[in-house]
Image (spheres, grey):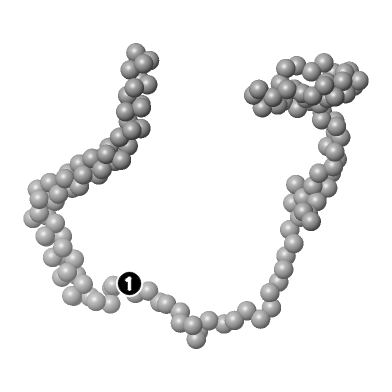
Amino acid sequence: MEKEKKTFVDWVKEHKKELIIAGMSIAAIIAVIIGIKNHKALEEAWSSLRKLVEKNPEAIPTVNTATIAEVTPVKDIVEINIVTADRIPHDVAEHLRNLPEGWKASAEKIATAAEHGYDLSPGQTWVETYRTGGLAA
């Protein structure tokens, strides 16, 4: 059963473009069929919309666009420096860190952790105190 699933997934990946084209084609065919079946209703809706526009052309919304002559240039640019908590310099205490899968701590880090009273598990390392934050130079 698992092998069948893998082969099906592989087949789908191999034929992705064809499946997308087939899906879009089916959707287009269904839209055409629905359009043909509801042709009279669509014609009635379109003609009633046309009559409404002919009776009241002011009801059609217009878009006001600004021209370049109407744009006022900005004379003074205000610069705002925002300092967030992650940019404020601060010290990070020494601690254990979990490493990515397959990584191992160096012999030096294992010894340093032991000096601080910690026995590292596989996939862990020791991190010394360091300073972080502040703006990048």
Q: Choose top left, top right, bottom left or bottom right for residue 59.
A: bottom left
- What residue do we see at 53% from left, 81% from top? 71
Please provide percent x and percent y for residue 8. Answer: 32, 24
Please provide percent x and percent y for residue 46. Answer: 16, 63
- What residue do we see at 17% from left, 44% from top? 30
Please provide percent x and percent y for residue 137. Answer: 79, 56
Q: Which residue is mark 1?
A: 61
Residue 126 visible to the viewer: yes
- What residue do we see at 42% from left, 77% from top? 65
Q: Is residue 124 above or below residue 85?
A: above
Task: In the displayed orientation, state which residue is furthest to the right.
Answer: 115
- What residue do we see at 85% from left, 32% from top? 128
Q: Is residue 1 above or below residue 91?
A: above
Residue 34 visible to the viewer: no
Q: Is residue 42 above or below residue 73?
A: above
**64 left or right, relative to 50:** right
Q: Is residue 42 above or below residue 133?
A: below
Q: Quadrant of the N terminus?
A: top left
**128 left or right, relative to 52:** right
**8 left or right, relative to 37:** right
The front one of 137 and 75 is 137
Determine whether the residue tagged by mark 1 lies in a helix, strand or loop: loop
**Neighbourhood count class around disc 1 (C-alpha, 10 Å): few under 14, some 14–19, many 20 upward:** few
The front one of 12 and 33 is 12
**69 left or right, relative to 99:** left
Amino acid tagged 1: Pro
Task: In the displayed orientation, state which residue is furthest to the top.
Answer: 1
